Image (spheres, grey):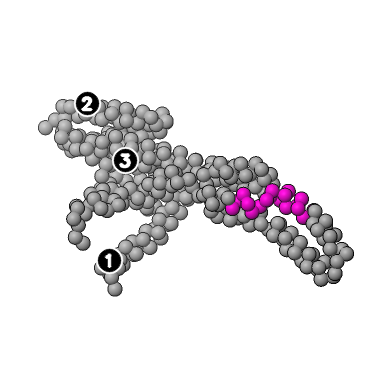
Amino acid sequence: MQCKVPCSTVLLVPIDGLATQLRKGVIEYCVLALLKEAPLYGGEVIEILRSKGQILISEGTIYPLLSRMRSEGFVETEWRDTPAGAPRRYYRLSRSGQKAVADFRDEWFRFRNSVDEIFRDGGGQR
Amino acid sequence: MTAVRASQLVDAYLRRLEIELVDLPAAKRHEIVDEIRRHIAGERSAMVDETDANVMNLLDRLGDPAEIAAEARSGAERRRLAQGLRRFGTLEVLTLALMLLAWPVGVILLSASRAWTTREKVLGLLLPPGGYPGAFLLIANFHRFASMTDAGPNWAQITVGAVLFTVSLLLLTAPIGMCVYLATRMRVPSHQQGEVRGSSRW
């Protein structure tokens, strides 16, 4: 597509902010999905997300996010002693958290497939 | 290499975080700051070589305290909205119940509500006239119309009877039908819709 003005200015979400917008929509579910495997403490959540690429930019934002998910009942917490150092707060998935992960998973695959299909077909052209 | 200023840097970072979070409830603020303090302590103790640069990189990765505070506030905002939406639902259900049982009060609440468009409000005002008390009052007076045709031919009595029966059915079903219609059209006020759309589902 030819753009007389810079393309990013005509999109609803500017392209440079797109990754941030996408990240915001999925980060909570990614954290819940990680906790599905085993209870984790904040540092471990950050470490795993860091290893997955550009999912998390400001690592510190995980803590308010975990706190919120705890307030909203999606995760439960417990303190555990560590061999060296202070106790750590571990987060594990609650029943409603498990449901949220399952719902998101279904929704995500449907959404992703639709977008993949549109891009594979060259923007919907037959 | 040594970390000459590491502790000062960490203290300054945590102080800034405290300040950025000042508008949050104290318990929430303490929880977030405490978790980040523990995170920093854990990362520092795992550093093979703690230098100022390593600590600065650690704080950089954590991100600007303002960003952390923005994330915390977005959660508080979401909770506020969710509470607002729940209140909104209760009020509108009450409106619909009163439309049926205490029509004048229901009408006032309907007019003041932002959950329906003007067109829906006008339809709501017209169709259930008086709610069920009004409908029963009208039906109770139908015998007067019926008695007007007592002296007339048989076919006129049957016709009037059929019309009155149909009108009675309409009067009995219209109020509840209108309430069902209004319930399906109920929506979040537009200024809240944007905010909800801007946040995640929960």
Q: Please determine if labels 2 and 3 lie on a single subunit.
A: no
Does residue B119 show up magenta in the picture?
no
Given residues A40 and A120, the one toward you in this image is: A120
Name which of mark 1 and mark 3 comes first in the sequence.
3
Q: Position of residue B181 (x, y in %)?
A: 58, 56
SS state under label 1: loop
Residue A118, horizontal then vertical, whole percent: 30, 66
Q: Is residue A102 left or right of residue B66?
A: right
Q: Name the residue beneath numbered marker 1.
A: A123
Question: Which of the two residues, A105 or B36, is positioned nearer the viewer here?
Answer: A105
* Magenta stretch in the rendered image: B123-140
> Which amino acid type is shown beneath numbered disc 2?
Gln
Q: Which mark is residue B8?
A: 2
Residue where numbered disc 3 is placed: A61
The residue at the point 81 percent across, 68 percent down is B156
Query: What residue is rendered at 43% in x and 56% in y?
Result: A103
Q: Chain of mark 2?
A: B
Choose top left, top right, bottom left or bottom right for residue A115. bottom left
Q: Tell me the chain of label 3.
A: A
Q: Residue furthest left?
A: B1
Above or below residue A121? Residue B136 is above
Q: Nearer the viewer, mark 2 or mark 3?
A: 3
The residue lying furthest to the front in this view is B152
Q: Secondary structure at mark 3?
A: helix
Task: Work out whether residue A55 or residue B47 is closer to the camera in this orientation and state it.
Answer: A55
Q: Amino acid at mark 1?
A: Gly
Asked if the residues shown at circle 2 and circle 3 are in contact, with their CB atoms under 8 angstroms apart, the answer is no
Based on the picture, tell me whether residue B129 belongs to the magenta stretch.
Answer: yes
- Quarter the N terminus of chain B occupies: top left
